[in-house]
Image (spheres, rainbow, N blue to C red):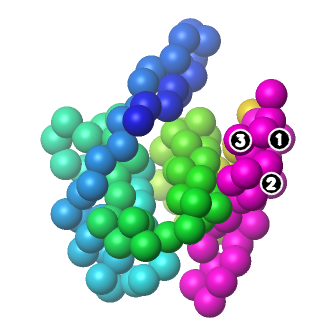
Amino acid sequence: MAFARRRRSGKFKKLKHSFCKLADEAHAVDPRLYSHTFCPQPGREHTVCWARAMTELTDDQVAGICLHELGHYMAGPGDPEESEYDAEKAADVAVFLEFGVEMAYKGDNLIQSVDYRKLMRRK
């Protein structure tokens, strides 16, 4: 699966999705973490990395996390001095501004979620 990242030139760069050992390790430490962007592993600069545990999530959660991670790419890596909260909020704002989709955080672990069926009906 590939998404596109808008470059400053207005063109898009394809993003890949892949399972990742680092994402698995992060999920083992914090069960809320299912994916990450800007992976430090060589060759994964344009990859959304997933923990294998994501296969246990609902479609609404996978779509929400996927859009949220895409939001990180649209917002860019951000300022190193920026708080984690600000980076997370910037990703959600980027998704809302680009697609008009508002992110919800649901469940015990407050996992990103969107209405997958409603999202797929959008034209």
Please identify the quadrant where the N terminus is shown: top left
Q: Is residue 98 in view? A: yes
- The image position of residue 97, as x and y in percent, is 80, 38
Question: Is 109 colored magenta in this rendering?
Answer: yes
- The image position of residue 66, as x and y in percent, is 54, 51
Mark 1–mark 3 CB contact (< 8 Å): no
Q: Is residue 97 in view? A: no
Which residue is at a point 19% across and 63% down the rendered structure image?
A: 21
Q: Amino acid at mark 1?
A: Gly
Foreground: 99 or 72? Answer: 99
Foreground: 56 or 51? Answer: 56
Q: Quadrant of residue 113?
A: bottom right
Task: Look at mark 3 in the image and give the residue it sits on.
Answer: 120
Q: Nearer the viewer, mark 1 or mark 3?
A: 3
Q: Which mark is residue 41?
A: none
- The image position of residue 60, as x and y in percent, is 64, 61
User: Magenta segment, which residues?
Assistant: 99-123
In the picture shown, does residue 57 fall above or below 91? below
Q: Amino acid at mark 3?
A: Met
Q: CA distance from mark 1 to mark 3?
A: 13 Å
Q: Amino acid at mark 2?
A: Glu
- The image position of residue 13, as x and y in percent, is 45, 21
Q: CA distance from mark 2 to mark 3?
A: 15 Å
Foreground: 4 or 118? Answer: 118
* Neighbour tally class for label 2: few under 14, some 14-19, many 20 plus, Cα within 10 Å: some
Count of residue discs: 3
Q: Nearer the viewer, mark 2 or mark 3?
A: 3
Task: Look at mark 2 in the image and give the residue it sits on.
Answer: 102
Please identify the quadrant where the C terminus is shown: top right
Which of disc 3 and disc 2 is earlier in sequence?
2
Foreground: 2 or 41? Answer: 2
